[in-house]
Amino acid sequence: MIVLGIESTAHTFGIGVIKEKKILVNKRDLFTTEEGGMVPAEVADHHVDVCDGLLKKALIEAKINMNDVDLIAFSQGPGIGHCLKVGAFFARALSLKYDKPIVGVNHCVAHLELGSMLFDCKDSVLLYVSGANTQVIAYAGGTYRIFGETLDMGVGNFIDAFARYLGLGFPGGPKIEKLASKTKEFVKLPYSVKGMDVSVGGMLTNMKRKYSSGVSKEVLCYSVQETLFAMLVEVAERALAHCGKKGLVLGGGVACNKRLQEMCKIMCIERGATLYVPPNDVLVDNAVMIAWLGLQKFSAQGRGDAYNSLKIRPYERTDDVKVGWK
Ligand code: AMP
Ligand code: MG
């Protein structure tokens, strides 16, 4: 089956096409601003502006036309309502025009299930660290469960907020990673793991205070990576232990960070688990994972979703997803 995926939960508008497990094309267009930050209506305007052009390019690159598509899948939530609406509307319009079945899927679950497409790992824990989302998710007892999450800010947003404070620009993650590689001098920062959850607000305040009292950018960047990633690895490891699972999949833009990958690798080796790191272009928000989860859902249901169930779900929690395809 050929599946066309559409992603529009936040700044990325993406079109991906897969044929079973083969990626035919993975295209994306990112909303960007000089100042950083996102005004929902402006991001949605961006998605409206690029959607048809990106689809045309994707079809050419995949060497198919819309008649070859067997299924349309779109991200139904969670995300920014304005942005989700553009993807949902575009998907529905294509479904109606070309008479194709359509399914809506959950973006966070799509990051997890991508592991089964890329690596054939059936039942892993996902460490999902993006701008807005920080969750440790696994499938257990018939549903997707959040085993740990941030109690305040998403880890990516936290990194970006600190980078903005240092005047490094947006996105801050890659710049922090580069500065961190210049030293091994460590200053102690608040390490905040509460049960299975993490909290980063205190660390942001503490780092700002240290910076104004003369601690260098490099030392702070190194220390934040060591502290923050250790917190994430601790929670991910406890989820692996609790679920008795043997695989850890990474997802989200922050997971592009090589030091985070290295720390996860060490933890997995020590406990006899396997680490699965998708390539960067599918670690970040992408429509290939949407297409893949759409295919799972469609295959299990034997049909597309009813049109009256295609409303966007901006606040959908991972543990609210009704699972009919496992
Ligand atoms: P996403 O929301 O999944 O698109 O991820 C975006 C977030 O990933 C932003 O907050 C970036 O700063 C962060 N990010 C991207 N690359 C890196 C990196 N190498 N290290 C840390 N964070 C990163
Ligand atoms: Mg994402």
Image: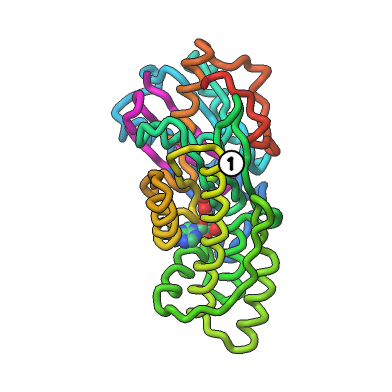
Residue 254 versus residue 216 in the image, above or below: above
Give the color scheme: rainbow, by chain, secondary structure or one colour: rainbow
Q: Residues within 10 Å of mark 1 (few under 14, many from 20)?
A: many
One can see residue 12 in this view: no
Residue 203 versus residue 318 in the image, above or below: below
Which residue is found at the position 42% from the left and 50% from the top? Answer: 268
Q: Position of residue 228 (x, y in %)?
A: 56, 63
Which residue is found at the position 56% from the left and 85% from the top? Answer: 215
One can see residue 77 in this view: yes
Q: Position of residue 258 (x, y in %)?
A: 39, 60
Residue 204, quarter of picture:
bottom right
Closer to us: 321 or 253: 321
Residue stretch rendered in magenta on the structure: 1-27
Q: Is residue 209 left or right of residue 71?
A: right
Q: Position of residue 279 (x, y in %)?
A: 36, 47
Residue 181, quarter of picture:
bottom left
Q: Position of residue 64 (x, y in %)?
A: 32, 25
Amino acid type for the residue under numbered disc 1: Thr
Closer to us: 123 or 164: 123
Residue position marked by numbered label 1 in the rendering: 9
Mark 1 CB near ligand 2 (8 Å cut): yes
Which residue is found at the position 64% from the left and 88% from the top? Answer: 213
The secondary structure type at the circle numbered 1 is loop
Residue 39 versus residue 118 in the image, above or below: below
Q: Main secondary structure of the magenta part?
A: strand
